[in-house]
Image (tube, rainbow, N blue to C red):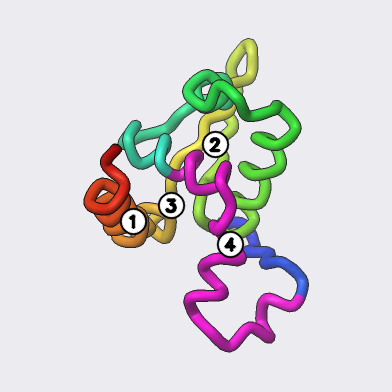
Amino acid sequence: MTEIKYPDGFEKIACPAEKTIVLIGNKWTLLIIRELVIANGPLRYNEIAKSLKKISSRTLSSRLKNLVNYGIVEKNIIDDSPIKVEYSLTEKGQELYKVTQPMADWSEKWHDI
């Protein structure tokens, strides 16, 4: 496993909820995690991009790199011709379902328009 690299100042954050928000608290990061949860297996970059139609390539690359650095997503390079890159949730990432599913349940209860 690669070394986990957290954002600068992360170790100084005392609140566990704030730490979680720093790592996954933006729109695209949560949606990438959602797609990997739904897939229940590895996805290639283009599959993620296709499912998140409005995300820019630069943003997707950046978010995936961060998720890999945080130990939430694993990047698997398959030495084939052409080279294939797949992304999947680590055990740490899979446990985020326990966080994201209650958020979805709350939204369905209060925002079912």
Amino acid at the residue labelled 3: Thr
Closer to the eye: label 2 or 1: 1
Closer to the eye: label 2 or 3: 3
Q: Is residue 70 above or below residue 52?
A: below
Closer to the eye: label 3 or 4: 4
User: Is the residue under label 4 in contact with that under label 1 (CB below 8 Å)?
Assistant: no
Secondary structure under the numbered disc 1 in the rendered image = helix
Residue 46 highlighted magenta (yes or no):
no
Q: Position of residue 83 (x, y in %)?
A: 63, 19
**Disc 4 or 2, which lies upstream in sequence?**
4
Amino acid at the residue labelled 1: Met
Closer to the eye: label 1 or 4: 1
Mark 4, residue position: 23
Mark 1, residue position: 103
CA gap, disc 2 to disc 3?
A: 11 Å
Mark 3, residue position: 90
